[in-house]
Image (tube, helix red, strand yellow):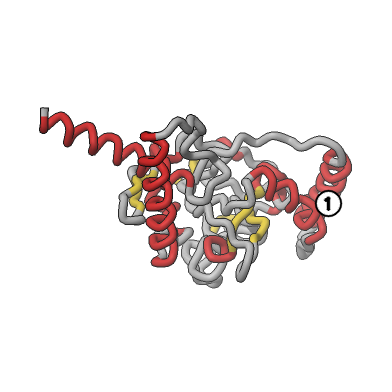
Amino acid sequence: MIHIEPKEPGPGWDNWKKDAHEETQKLIDDANNGKKLKFKDRIWRNLKPFLENLFHKKCAYCEGIYEGGAWMDVEHFRPKGKVTVDHNPGNTVKITNPAGKEIDHPGYYWLAYDWRNLLLSCNKCNRGAGKMNQFPVAGIRSCCHEDSLEVEEPLLLNPYHEKHPGDHIKFALNGVISGRTEKGRETIKICNLNREELQTVRQREWEKVKMGLFFKLIGEDNRKLVTDDMEYSAYIRESLKSLVKKLEEDLEERI
């Protein structure tokens, strides 16, 4: 995962925002009146090209580019229709309503079309054994559009908010990652970021960069070694730092 600066796009954006705002108000009205909430796929579909550009066509969580046999989802950081405690859709987070009755958390319906709550995610990080409708928090949880999100402390990394995701995730040279913090550990577990195929491709891409590094060191190519549009750039960047540190330590022992 890398930090993504949340910047609004240019032409045509106002029309999308107007549509999203109107449909958000309908959801809030329906929630206030106890009606079943209906979501409009067109809003996410129309936003997807913007997200693809913003995220360099990479998954917000694993950084993979899936152009052949898989697809990308417009993923809700805070789930829109329900919140679960694990992958099981029946294990929902419970809240207490004003009448004192325990009910299922309705989901963050008022953020369904908020672009700052929407990420680009591959289906493996988002579905199945991935995130699904999980959203763990520490302490108080927001339950309706009148609640402030400031009371929540999400235990899931958000690339829009985290300036340095590497502070939360540790990268090993064999493709395995681990959490430095509770937030990092929860994100790895929830999005299944240590699945075997991810470990394999991380290590493969690292080997490519490592070989390129040696050629650049003996040549005159001054281009940047790792750029944000590269697959698994966070893993490669941190692995490169680890390699340089190890080389420095080995050299220190020899002189």
Residue occupying the point 66% across, 49% down: 118
**Residue 176 coordinates in the image, percent (x, y):** 34, 56
Secondary-structure class at tag 1: helix
- The residue indicated by pointer 1 is 23
- Vertical arrangement, residue 20 with respect to residue 223, above or below: below
**Category of crowding for the residue at label 1, using alpha-carbon neighbours closer than 10 angstroms: few (below 14), some (14–19), many (at least 20):** some
- Residue at the farthest left position: 254
**Residue 11 coordinates in the image, percent (x, y):** 86, 37
- Vertical arrangement, residue 118 with respect to residue 166, above or below: below
- Residue at the farthest front position: 219
Q: Is residue 91 visible?
A: yes
**Residue 32 coordinates in the image, percent (x, y):** 77, 53
Residue occupying the point 72% across, 49% down: 110
Residue 182 or 121: which is nearer the viewer? 121
Residue 206 or 83: which is nearer the viewer? 206
In the figure, residue 101 lies in which quadrant?
bottom right
The three-letter amino acid code for the residue at tag 1 is: Glu
| Number of marks in picture | 1
**Residue 244 coordinates in the image, percent (x, y):** 30, 36
Q: Is residue 98 visible?
A: no
Q: Is residue 101 left or right of residue 62?
A: right
In the figure, residue 204 lies in which quadrant?
bottom left
Quadrant of the snapshot with the C terminus: top left
Residue occupying the point 67% across, 56% down: 74
Residue 80 or 160: which is nearer the viewer? 160
- Residue at the farthest top position: 255
Residue occupying the point 63% across, 62% down: 67
